[in-house]
Amino acid sequence: MQPPAEVQLRRHAVQSQSAMLSSHLHRGAKPKSGLVRRGALVSRGPRLTEALLPQLGSDAVSFQSGSSRGSSSRGLCQQATLQNEVCPQWREVNHGLCAIEIEGWPASKTRRRCSGHPNVKNHELQQVVSEVRATVREGRAPDTAHAETDTESGDRLARVRGLMRGILARPDAQFANELVGVLGSMERNSMCELAEEEFDSFAAKLLRRALRMDCPTQEEAVAELRAIRRSQGRDESTPCGTRASPMSRLTTELFPAWLDGEVAAGALEDRLRIGMECWEQAGCPTDIDGVGLYAAICLELGELQRVRKAMENLLDAEIDLRLSFQPLFLDCLSCEGCVDERHLRSVEGSLPDLVQRAARLAQRCPAAGVTLRRHGALLLRPTATGGFEILSEGFNHAARPLGPRGLDPSFGVDRTFASAEEAATAGLPLKLRKLRPAQRHAEIHCLLQLPRLEQAVGTEMLVVELADIGPGLRWAEPCSRGCMQLLIRHGVAAARFTDGQGGLHEQRLRYKPELDVPAASYAGTGRLRGDMISERACTDLDEKLQREVDRRLPKTLEEIVQSGAVEAAALRARAPLALRGRCLPLPRRKRRACDVDEAPQLVACRDGLEGKSLAELSVLRRAG
């Protein structure tokens, strides 16, 4: 049976983006720091196609599991065609995330980015592996029994969890990028350039090590290269047989070819096994987040017995899996026979059932233009029998943009203008005349569907957040960017949300109908001044109150989401390449005077440098 026309068009878009990325890589364009720059993913075509699979919807049932390059494990080597209804692949939502920022990694506030997560380098993940292996060699068993109370043990567990997140989400190109930085530092700082004869004998071996989380430092690489040259009777500092910098050819020709060839064969499996072994040696069997990541890695490797044992440990500790993991992951566990079905069934209307329902709503966020901080929410009314009645549902999604905001000279106050033309007439600077992108949060989505806002008095809000990477649920407290303030103003009695540790946190709210939400958020003088999310929320509820005055029916869930369909399509067009930073195509790099195929005047300049000593060349290079 032929798939629907929409799915065919989306598949064609995926193939076009993969072809564009591959052709761009082979044309010679290179990011400033290597194959990956600020989250821009430069990966293989099939891997990119996997990354875009969630956009194809439930009709796209054919996919490639894991990596198909030389792997012998069940989860990595087989290419299967599965029905999503039988075994949904929760891992699809993680493909394509560069994971430059890793959630939960212990770091100071100054190191965290706008997302709240720190930027973690590959060498930090490699250091975690070294520490765990050193602990095992010394015969010291890590004390993880008090992970939540002992700061040192908790940080160690958090780093091991971050290691597994990085292994699950980071592509080969991101590990190769670290080696590009090492080789570039060798060339700039140590005056130690590679010759063409050393590409296969030295650079390829280093790439093989880097893909397996054993990338050497600059000092180690220089010492190793000089030892090789010394053993061959050549000069330790200068290359032989070439006058060109090797970095251009390495990053535009050799590295992409090696990543698709035997050098990278089995690298993903090796990294997954490293993460699995580190958790077995330094993990805690009742740490829900870590056990979920460990089980996810074991599923990738086909180690189902390990998955069963990990889930049994959680069940023995009386941990409810329905309050701990995402629905797609639980479906996958059930399909593989790793968990008994009776542990996943729940009574309709119970809290575990409602949590899973909200989590399924959060799975719609990527299609609506939100790929990080995926929230789902339910507005509930307690019943006399102790259960809950669902009043409305919602999830984070892209919304219509807001107009420019700035100082209006006519009134002497900041205000939002209806259009860029109105802002220009008021004298706003050019950079402030642009439309401002906005996002509508799940809590506001729920309130907008009520027939009348006064019906929110005495209700409860249930909020669930899906982990950006991994199968778990995260701390999902309603944000202070308008959501919590509007819940308080409209009489929501309590907010329940997942705590990331297999439970629900309940926060009672005090009804304050007189609360001035704009002054407490975007229109105030505090840190939320000019905040677009809180302004979008207040504007939406003002429009909702006006609809009630006009006696018009409230918008439905789908109508509200469709109001931002254009913005969501624009955001999806940039995913997954722009999830964590700049996306392709990157600008062409500047040509260097030491390249082989440069202009004639540059050749003359290069020839004029022949015969210079290393000291003279160093002085000339510093002088430009």
Image: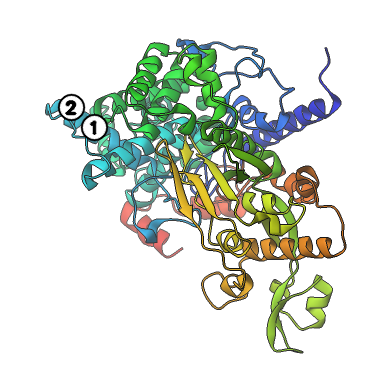
**In the image, residue 585 lies at what x, y percent?**
66, 46
Question: Distance between the Cα atoms at labels 2 and 1?
Answer: 6 Å
Closer-to-camera residue (386/62)? 386
The image shows residue 589, relative to residue 365, as above or below, that is below
The N terminus lies in quadrant? top right
Residue at point 55%, 55% (across, down): 493
**In the image, residue 73 lies at what x, y percent?**
45, 11
**In the image, residue 557 lies at what x, y percent?**
75, 44
As drawn, which residue projects farthest toward the front?
Answer: 384
- Indicate the amino acid at tag 1: Val
- Which scheme is used to colour this image of the protein? rainbow
Residue at point 45%, 27% (across, down): 321
Q: Secondary structure at mark 1?
A: helix
In the rendered structure, the answer to whether residue 366 lies left or right of residue 197 reads right
Q: Is residue 153 visible?
A: yes
Residue at point 19%, 33% (across, down): 142
Q: Can you identify the residue that label 2 sits on?
A: 136
The image shows residue 3, relative to residue 488, as above or below, that is above
Residue contact at pointers 2 and 1, CB within 8 angstroms: yes
In the rendered structure, the answer to whether residue 129 lies left or right of residue 396 reads left
Q: Can you identify the residue that label 1 sits on?
A: 132
Residue at point 40%, 17% (across, down): 307
Mark 2, Cα crowd under 10 Å, few <14 / some 14-19 / many 20+, is: some
- Indicate the amino acid at tag 2: Val
Mark 1, Cα crowd under 10 Å, few <14 / some 14-19 / many 20+, is: many
Q: Secondary structure at mark 2?
A: helix
Q: Is residue 241 visible?
A: no
The image shows residue 260, relative to residue 567, as above or below, that is above
Quarter-of-image position of residue 283? top left
**In the image, residue 54 lies at what x, y percent?**
66, 31
